[in-house]
Amino acid sequence: MRTHNGHLARILHACTDQTMTAALAEMDLTAAQSHIMCYITHRKEPPCPRDIEEAFQLTHPTVSGILSRLEQKGFIQMRPDAQDRRCKRIFVLEKGMELDEMIHQVVRSMEEKMVQNFTEEEKVQFTDLLRRAIANMGADPCKRKHKEEPEK
């Protein structure tokens, strides 16, 4: 019986998400929260929630929930924008900055495990094939355009 590529992609996604969430549990983060933290941490200017909605293709309620939990945990702080009081800017606090290298270590470890028995050429080819498959489906490989998963 032939296994379909969509099914294989779904299994790979589930495996990476579970691995990330388990590795980040000691930091009190989910995989989704870690992606948002990396995005916020590496911006030149503090973003607003709409920036995250657009970058990750998430709805306003989902982003609000993630940001609310990150703020409750002391990783970020929301402050009104000086020029537009309707917009709140997201600032990473010291506790959030401390997460950055740990998150990157988890990601590197997971990605190394994923391609552990690949040759260097196969690693490059794997990345290229993933990007092309995503583009073939009409999405930008650098942006998320999938159904949102419930935030924990």
Image (cartoon, rainbow, N blue to C red):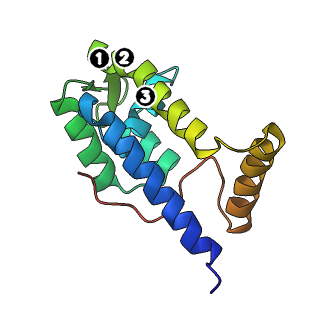
Callout 1 environment at 10 Å: few (<14), some (14 to 19), or many (20+)?
A: some
Q: Which mark is residue 97?
A: 2
Which residue corresponds to the image point at 55% horizontal and 73% vertical from the top-left? 7
Figure check: 137 above or below 105: below
Alpha-carbon span between mark 2 and mark 1: 6 Å
- Location of mark 1 (residue): 93
Tell me the distance, in whole angstroms, between the alpha carbons under discs 3 and 1: 16 Å
The answer to whether the residue labelled 2 contacts the one labelled 1, judged by CB atoms less than 8 Å apart, is yes
User: Image quadrant of residue 41?
Assistant: top left
Amino acid type, label 3: Ile
Amino acid at circle 1 = Leu
Judging depth in this view, the residue of 35 and 13 nearest the camera is 13
Mark 3 in CB contact with mark 2 (< 8 angstroms): no
Observer-nearest of 14 and 116? 116
Residue 42's spot in the image, x, y percent? Answer: 50, 24
- Answer yes or no: is residue 10 visible: yes
